[in-house]
Image (tube, grey):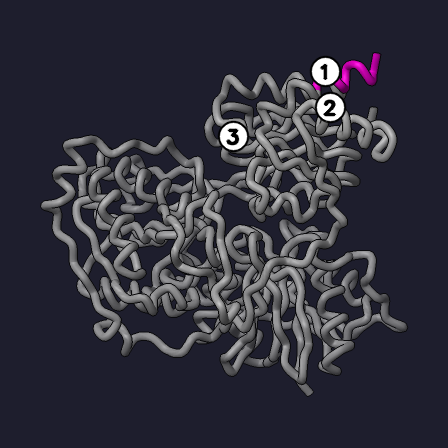
């Protein structure tokens, strides 16, 4: 029988919870294809994580161990998984699309002369064929992608594509097998230093109930004040997409998206934000989304509850006045 | 330092895109621009050269139109350019793109190869890492800073990797290496008039598909269908004059979303 392997992510000995989404994806695909679902944890001294994962509905969990797997390096991870897959072949290997996975999966797939379908948001099983859905052109289109190689096929799933709370628990704990990998001298070339945070985060946007967020459409630094006035009128926090923070128009700790904060406020009001994938992953869990953008095809409208196609500089000033009136 | 920068031409950010008749790709009659992270990769290469001397070479794989990206790079200060020119390069998966580039530079000796961290069209975020594996070089991704390890004098570099949720990490690594560059690592320069003039006389090497094809294989990924995403939400579009829209929106904020 064919095997699906989910590689669970751990960082410094802690399970990255996005891995539950990947297990949920694996369980859904296994149920449809009838393939066997297994999971692997890769690291040094990560048996506890393997046991935690083994409580879920899985045929088997592997604890792939080597002292050289801590701290994380792409060389060690790609080497260990290549060795592991040599002994335990899988047809499909699933992982979350994290920065860590992005760092080693293309290397691993290439070493095995195969390919990784990256940042997928879903799948379809049609006529015995698996198709993976991924966004293209910054989310303006989606593509159904098929895999043409002999395998294994690697697929990484975008955060939030599957629901972690849908993971099924097993009737009994899955067996855990420890696989020790000998990573020879000279394989690991990079020397990573400690992980750190740049500056003390002054604002915790994750706690904000209302967020007014600005993107490229704000055009100039001096226009940020208009967004600030709107945020103040609503009693919310001001945030931004990456390019605004790159320009230094707002500090980095106000950035929403994969490299910034992930938020889920009651209201997310997006001003002049087109909705690049890296931004969307940081705010798509918001309870309600209002988007104002001049481009009617902006991907942000795909996830908006209320949409205004128009010039934000025309709409925001009367909006501020109306909010003040309503609050008075 | 001799640095290669891999650059890609992608549809302009605001360009309205239409599907082709087969529903497998976009119609190509749109405006193009350089993939944004690649522009930052070029800027970083130029800055490294200014600091340490050396050479900056730019490469792209794409149709005749992609030459514009190389011209702009030469005008900004790149020393020479390599154009893998063929319409077929547009449809390659990341593995084949990397194999084509590796074949085109097999007689060169670079210390560093930069790519943008991902492209705005396919968004694979893979080509640079695959290229490193093909060349047998170490790599690091999503880079925000590059320093030569001058004090240690070991010929290596220290890079700053961006991690998720505001975390960073320094990584020491030997050369040669491949780095994928994050947007915002530096401030982009504009081409000067003199630069634009000089660009015309700088060396440009064309590489045909036939020259690199023996290093490539069939695509391992195939786009079966490209389509407009199905809306997951029932979006209500508010229309009217700005004053009317403002009134309607406040009504929604108050009565539907209950945030006022």
Q: Earlier in the sequence, mark 2 or mark 3?
A: 2
Question: Left or right: A150 with respect to A20?
Answer: left
| Distance CA(mark 3)–CA(mark 1) | 25 Å
The quadrant where residue A274 appears = top right
Question: What is the chain identity of the residue bearing mark 1?
Answer: A
Q: Earlier in the sequence, mark 3 or mark 1?
A: 3
Q: The N terminus of chain B lies in which quarter of the figure?
A: top left
Q: Which mark is residue A321?
A: 1
Q: Secondary structure at mark 3?
A: helix
Q: Give the residue at mark 2.
A: A236
Nearer mark to the viewer, of 3 and 1:
1
Residue A324 highlighted magenta (yes or no): yes
Question: What is the chain identity of the residue bearing mark 3?
Answer: A
| Distance CA(mark 2)–CA(mark 3) | 18 Å
Furthest-left residue in view? B201
> Looking at the picture, do discs 3 and 1 lie on one chain?
yes
Q: Earlier in the sequence, mark 2 or mark 1?
A: 2
Q: Is residue A278 visible?
A: no
Q: Give the residue at mark 3.
A: A244
Q: The C terminus of chain B lies in which quarter of the figure?
A: top right
| Distance CA(mark 2)–CA(mark 1) | 16 Å
Disc 3 packing (10 Å; few <14; some 14–19; many ≥20): many
**Residue drawn 63% across and 58% down?**
B229
Residue B102: percent from left, percent from top: 29, 65
Residue B224: percent from left, percent from top: 54, 73
Q: Which mark is residue A38?
A: none
Residue A25: percent from left, percent from top: 72, 66
Start-end of magenta stretch: A320-328
Up the image or down, B38 lies above or below A113; here it is above
Residue A145: percent from left, percent from top: 56, 70
Question: What is the chain identity of the residue bearing mark 2?
Answer: A
């Amino acid at each position: 029988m064919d095997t699906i392997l989910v590689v669970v992510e751990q960082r410094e000995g802690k399970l990255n919870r996005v891995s539950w989404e990947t297990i949920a994806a694996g369980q859904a695909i296994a149920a449809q294809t009838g393939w066997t679902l297994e999971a692997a944890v890769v690291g040094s001294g990560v048996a506890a994580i393997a046991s935690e994962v083994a409580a879920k509905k899985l045929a088997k969990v592997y604890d792939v161990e080597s002292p050289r797997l801590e701290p994380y390096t792409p060389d060690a991870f790609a080497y260990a998984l290549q060795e592991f897959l040599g002994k335990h072949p899988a047809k499909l290997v699933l992982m979350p699309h994290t920065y860590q996975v992005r760092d080693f999966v293309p290397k691993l797939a290439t070493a095995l002369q195969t390919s990784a379908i990256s940042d997928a948001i879903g799948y379809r099983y049609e006529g015995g064929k698996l198709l993976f859905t991924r966004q293209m052109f910054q989310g303006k289109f989606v593509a159904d992608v098929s895999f043409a190689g002999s395998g294994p096929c690697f697929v990484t799933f975008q955060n939030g594509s599957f629901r972690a709370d849908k993971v099924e628990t097993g009737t009994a704990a899955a067996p855990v097998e420890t696989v020790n990998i000998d990573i020879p001298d000279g394989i690991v070339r990079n020397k990573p230093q400690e992980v750190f945070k740049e500056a003390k985060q002054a604002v915790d946007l994750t706690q904000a109930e209302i967020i007014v967020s600005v993107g490229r459409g704000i055009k100039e630094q001096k226009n940020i004040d208009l967004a600030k006035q709107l945020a103040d009128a609503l009693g919310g926090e001001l945030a931004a997409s990456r390019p605004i923070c790159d320009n230094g128009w707002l500090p980095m700790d106000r950035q929403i998206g994969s490299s910034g904060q992930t938020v889920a406020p009651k209201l997310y009001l997006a001003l002049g934000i087109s909705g690049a994938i890296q931004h969307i992953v940081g705010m798509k869990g918001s309870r309600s989304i209002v988007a104002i953008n001049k481009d009617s095809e902006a991907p942000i409208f795909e996830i908006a509850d209320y949409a205004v196609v128009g010039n934000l500089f025309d709409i925001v000033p009367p909006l501020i006045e109306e909010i003040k009136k309503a609050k008075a | 330092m001799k640095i290669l920068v891999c650059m890609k031409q992608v549809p302009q950010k605001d360009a309205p895109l239409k599907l082709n008749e087969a529903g497998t790709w976009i119609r190509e009659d749109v405006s193009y621009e350089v993939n944004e992270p690649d522009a930052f990769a070029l800027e970083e290469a130029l800055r490294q050269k200014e600091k340490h001397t050396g050479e900056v070479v730019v490469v792209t794989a794409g149709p005749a139109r992609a030459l514009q990206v190389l011209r702009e790079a030469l005008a900004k200060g790149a020393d020479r350019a390599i154009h893998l020119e063929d319409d077929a390069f547009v449809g390659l998966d990341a593995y084949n793109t990397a194999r084509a580039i590796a074949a085109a530079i097999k007689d060169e000796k670079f210390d560093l190869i930069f790519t943008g961290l991902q492209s705005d069209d396919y968004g694979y975020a893979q080509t640079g890492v695959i290229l490193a594996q093909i060349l047998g070089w170490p790599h690091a991704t999503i880079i925000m800073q590059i320093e030569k390890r001058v004090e240690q004098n070991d010929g290596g570099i220290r890079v700053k990797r961006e991690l998720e949720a505001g975390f960073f990490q320094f990584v020491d690594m030997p050369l040669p290496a491949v780095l994928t560059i994050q947007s915002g690592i530096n401030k982009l320069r504009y081409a000067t008039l003199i630069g634009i003039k000089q660009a015309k006389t700088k060396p440009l090497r064309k590489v045909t598909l036939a020259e690199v094809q023996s290093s490539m294989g069939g695509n391992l990924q195939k786009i079966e269908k490209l389509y407009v995403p199905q809306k997951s939400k029932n979006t209500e579009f508010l229309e009217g004059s700005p004053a009317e829209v403002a009134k309607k929106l406040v009504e929604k904020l108050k009565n539907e979303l209950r945030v006022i």
